[in-house]
Image (cartoon, helix red, strand yellow):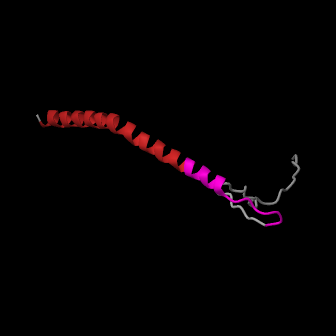
Amino acid sequence: MNFLKVILIIVLFYYLIRLLSRLLFPFVFQHYISHKMNGFSNDSGKNRKQRKPKEGEITIENITGVKAKSKKYQGEYIDYEEIKD
């Protein structure tokens, strides 16, 4: 009898999770998309409002998210010849 109780609880838990995910996922997804859209519109507004530099004025622009390829030292290349015995 305890085995059947455990199986019933597992099945009810499974269906409860499925029901909640069907109800909550669209809401969470909608919130996420609207949040990202607001972020994009705010970013584009910042770019339009930037003042144009006067001629001869020096400006420094930081580009975030773009990483230069690292040139790690990979060792020295050694050319070799095979020796036949």
Q: Is residue 36 left or right of residue 84?
A: left
Q: Indicate the position of residue 25 as horizontal and vertical percent values.
A: 38, 38
- Specify the quadrant of the image occupied by residue 55: bottom right
Considering only vertical position in the picture, is 50 above or below 1? Answer: below
Considering only vertical position in the picture, is 74 above or below 40? Answer: below
Considering only vertical position in the picture, is 35 above or below 1? Answer: below
Q: Indicate the position of residue 45 as horizontal and vertical percent values.
A: 60, 52
Can the viewer see residue 65 in this picture? no
Considering only vertical position in the picture, is 22 above or below 83? Answer: above
Location of the N terminus by quadrant is top left
Q: Which residue is rendered at x = 65% and y = 52% of the image?
A: 48
Q: Is residue 67 left or right of residue 30?
A: right
Q: Is residue 49 magenta?
A: yes
Q: Which residue is rendered at x = 72% and y = 58% of the image?
A: 70
Q: Which residue is rendered at x = 43% and y = 40% of the image?
A: 30
Q: Indicate the position of residue 77 as horizontal and vertical percent values.
A: 83, 56
Q: Nearer the viewer, residue 51 or 77?
A: 51
Q: Which residue is rendered at x = 47% and y = 43% of the image?
A: 34
Q: Is residue 51 magenta?
A: yes
Q: Indicate the position of residue 67 as horizontal and vertical percent values.
A: 68, 56
- Specify the quadrant of the image occupied by residue 71: bottom right
Can the viewer see residue 18 in this picture? yes
Q: Is residue 84 left or right of residue 6?
A: right
**What number of labels is visible?**
0
Q: Nearer the viewer, residue 66 or 62?
A: 62
Q: Residue furthest left?
A: 1
Q: Nearer the viewer, residue 40 or 54?
A: 54
Q: Nearer the viewer, residue 33 or 58?
A: 58
Report the span colored magenta: 41-57
